Image (cartoon, grey):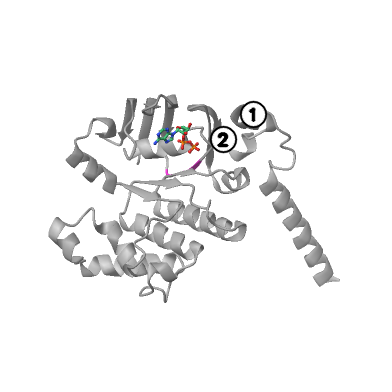
Amino acid sequence: MLMLSVSKLVKTYPGGVRALNGLDLTVDTPQVVTVIGSSGAGKSTLIRCINRLVEPTSGRIVLNDLDVTALSRRGLRRARRRMGMIFQEYNLVERLTVMENTLSGRLGYVNFWQAYRRKYSPPDIARAFELLHRVGLDGYEYTRADALSGGQRQRVGIARALMQQPDLLLVDEPTASLDPKTARQIMRLLCKLAHENGTPALINIHDVGLAQEFADRIVGLADGVNAFDGTADELTPEVLNAIYGEEDWSKTINRPTADSNKKMQRDGLERESAAG
Ligand code: ADP
């Protein structure tokens, strides 16, 4: 069972911006946690401190038995294999194929010369095929990344992260560059695969509706600390005010419930008309 423990995390950027201000967070079940908060609240800094793309100023991050904050460069490379990262802008190698981009998720595991020559084992290749099937990219294996749509690129990003067989998925605004329909499809896919694999995911997302609909748990950041930690149902207007500041939230929150009510009504009507 995974255990991620973040305690008293502080990040002050050069120039003095204090992005994280003593943040505590524990993830100890394979759940999807969405992280919401205003622009500048520290969401991206949190995700990037966990894999030390950003160096924390102080505080402690422990992944299972590993104190991530105390790792040497070499230890950090090993630790990063255990954390799959998915980016807003996909970070694919444009001139490589979908298959090559997916396989590059394994680069952390193979030695330098294998990576240099891009030699992958038959089981890795079989696994990449299977993952590309699971993300809905059958038939695109040999398409170059630069020929894909945004949604397809993010599907490759998901496959590449899962190729690592990570203990934890770190996901930074996965849908911010996508249209609303594709964004929903990508969130649905990401959360489904995280659940199927039993891999916990920490997902930064600015869309409250998507955060509510797909998360098992929502963490709200404000000014670099945890202003909320609970379920979608607990995300009341008061809580949203605490996270984002005062606003009329009546049309934003509980949208999934409203949608499912509508769907139930529609289904009911259809059943009635079918029966009639
Ligand atoms: P969010 O993801 O919630 O929008 P960020 O973590 O990106 O928030 O940023 C938190 C704060 O840290 C913001 O005030 C931002 O301007 C600042 N910040 C982020 N990255 C840097 C950086 N590399 N250098 C200086 N300040 C930064």
Say if disc 2 is inside 8 Å of ligand 1.
yes
Residues shaded magenta: 30-34
Question: Quick one: SS at disc 2?
Answer: loop
Q: Classify the position of the N terminus by image quarter.
A: top left
Residue in the image at 56% along x and 43% along y? 206
Q: Is 38 above or below relative to 185? A: above
Place of residue 220 in the rendered image (x, y in percent of width and height, measured from the top left)? 54, 33
User: Mark 2 or 1 closer to N-term?
Assistant: 2
Residue in the image at 55% along x and 35% along y? 37
Q: CB of mark 2 within 8 Å of CB of mark 1? A: yes
Q: Is residue 173 magenta?
A: no
Circle 2 residue = 38
Answer left or right for 231 relative to 43. right
Question: Quick one: SS at disc 1?
Answer: loop
Answer left or right for 176 relative to 6. right
Type of amino acid at the residue the image marks with label 2: Ser
Type of amino acid at the residue the image marks with label 1: Gly
Residue in the image at 26% along x and 65% along y? 124
Marker disc for residue 245 = 1
Place of residue 189 in the rendered image (x, y in percent of width and height, measured from the top left)? 50, 58
